[in-house]
Amino acid sequence: MVNKKLKVAVIGDGISALSLLERLGKDEGLRSKVDLTWIAAPQKAPGCSYHSTALITDHGIDPSFGGLGSHLLEALEMSFGWDFLNEAPGVYEAEHWAIDDGTDSFARRYGRGHPECEHFLFERPLSCRKARAKLIDVRVFLPALKKRVEQLWHCDVKNELVFNFDGQNLSTDQGIHQIDYVFWCTGAGVTKPQSFLQHPRASRLKRVEGLAYHFKIPEWTSKNFALTLGRVNIISRAGDVFVGGTTQNETARIPDARKLSEQLKGLSEFGVRMSEFKNRIPLFWGGPRQKGQKKKFLIEALNEKEFAVLGTYKNGYSLSQLGAFKAHTWLLEKLY
Ligand SMILES: Cc1cc2nc3c(=O)[nH]c(=O)nc-3n(C[C@H](O)[C@H](O)[C@H](O)COP(=O)(O)OP(=O)(O)OC[C@H]3O[C@@H](n4cnc5c(N)ncnc54)[C@H](O)[C@@H]3O)c2cc1C
């Protein structure tokens, strides 16, 4: 049993850090025993969460897939049941349509589709699989979550760039904080502290650019859906429409009009009505994501004093709930 308050640092202000702080903050018993230092450096280490298309869906997640699938499903169930997400502004209920392109890879991922024609975007009946989804407008949702965290903790985030933690001292570009336990929710932006270099999986996390194009289609304000054909996704919520591919390479930060028109052409050849996109100039939308080997995230203790919620890659908006749950359990073990 520990009597004095534990000095806990949470580093980051993306979805992972905010989910963790919200979960810890709701636990009044724990909150009264914790002296929190919350740090992030959004200008010096830009995060990913504010550049995310933030779709939550259970489409294509296979629980038997190398252990990863069952974790992703667990995380999804947690996020679908997250009370804040279910009440927050900027969150839209929707369906996620995956169009069967006849390939083996579709069958492996989803099974075969069923004929559907009622979707307003289809020019002809298409074979699809449907699933539930939540679509998040990150510009509305994240500030609301941040406000909730600030209310729970009566604490503001310190704008400092963290360099290292030696088990006692957390050093930043502004000075040193005496800390007992550190939660790294630093995504792809982290500088490499010693604990990361020493941990076999943390040292292998790699940065991967994410990319989507953002169209404004006010006529679609009431049309909330996600649609996937092969590697192309369309996400539409409240008139904001995102078209994006899958993992991109280093050059993904540079808008590539040719790639976009190839994606739209591919969709239209398949029978998805693309005329609304003609003559609309998209905004570029992207940021750094981070993934581990074989897309495996890193949600675990790095050692006795440090816990990481990292490498959430394409599922950051649900894995953050699993991260918060596991980090909470770990901290409770330290407290009691
Ligand atoms: C275009 C795009 C589309 C995406 N689509 C989806 C999707 O549809 N569904 C989904 O679930 N996920 C999606 N993702 C992925 C998802 O957005 C990420 O997995 C998630 O946002 C990662 O959140 P995070 O909090 O772990 O990290 P981040 O949001 O990157 O936050 C990291 C934080 O740590 C801080 N930081 C880093 N280093 C330091 C340091 N040394 N000192 C102090 N602070 C530091 C940063 O300032 C930042 O606040 C997408 C991403 C992109 C770019």
Image (cartoon, grey):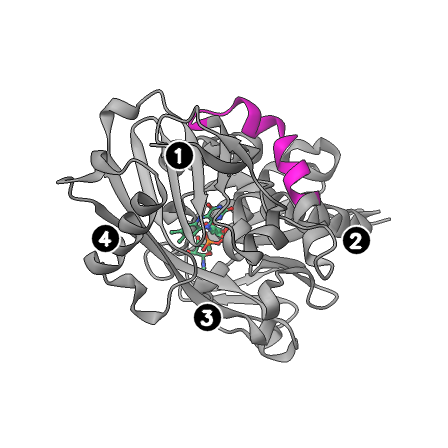
- Is the Cβ of the residue at disc 2 closer than 8 Å to that at disc 3? no
Q: Quick one: label 1 or label 3, which is nearer the N terminus? A: 1
Task: Give the left or right position of residue 282, taking residue 335 as reference.
Answer: left
Task: Tell me: residue 195, above or below residue 336.
Answer: below
Residue at figure coordinates x 29%, y 25% from the top left: 220
Foreground: disc 1 or disc 2: 1
Disc with the residue nearer the chain's start (2 vs 4):
4
**Residue 307: percent from the left, percent from the top?**
66, 60
Q: Pointer 1: what residue?
A: 137
Seen from the viewer's position, the closer of residues 208 and 236 is 236
Q: Give, as a single range, the part of the protein colored magenta.
A: 74-91
Sequence order check: which comes first, mark 4 or mark 3? 3
- Crowd band around label 1 with a 10 angstrom C-alpha radius: few (<14), some (14–19), many (20+): some
- Position of 157 compared to 284: left or right? right
Q: Name the residue under label 3.
A: 191
Secondary structure of the magenta portion, mostly?
A: helix
Q: How crowded is mark 4: few (under 14 residues within 10 Å), some or many (20 or more)?
A: few
Depth-wise, is mark 2 or mark 3 nearer the camera? 3
Amino acid carrying mark 4 in the image: Ser
Percent of width and height locating residue 129: 56, 37
- The residue shown at (55%, 48%) is 16
In the picture of the structure, the residue carrying the numbered disc 4 is 261
Measured in 3D between alpha carbons, the distance from the residue under mark 2 to the one under mark 4, in whole angstroms, is: 53 Å
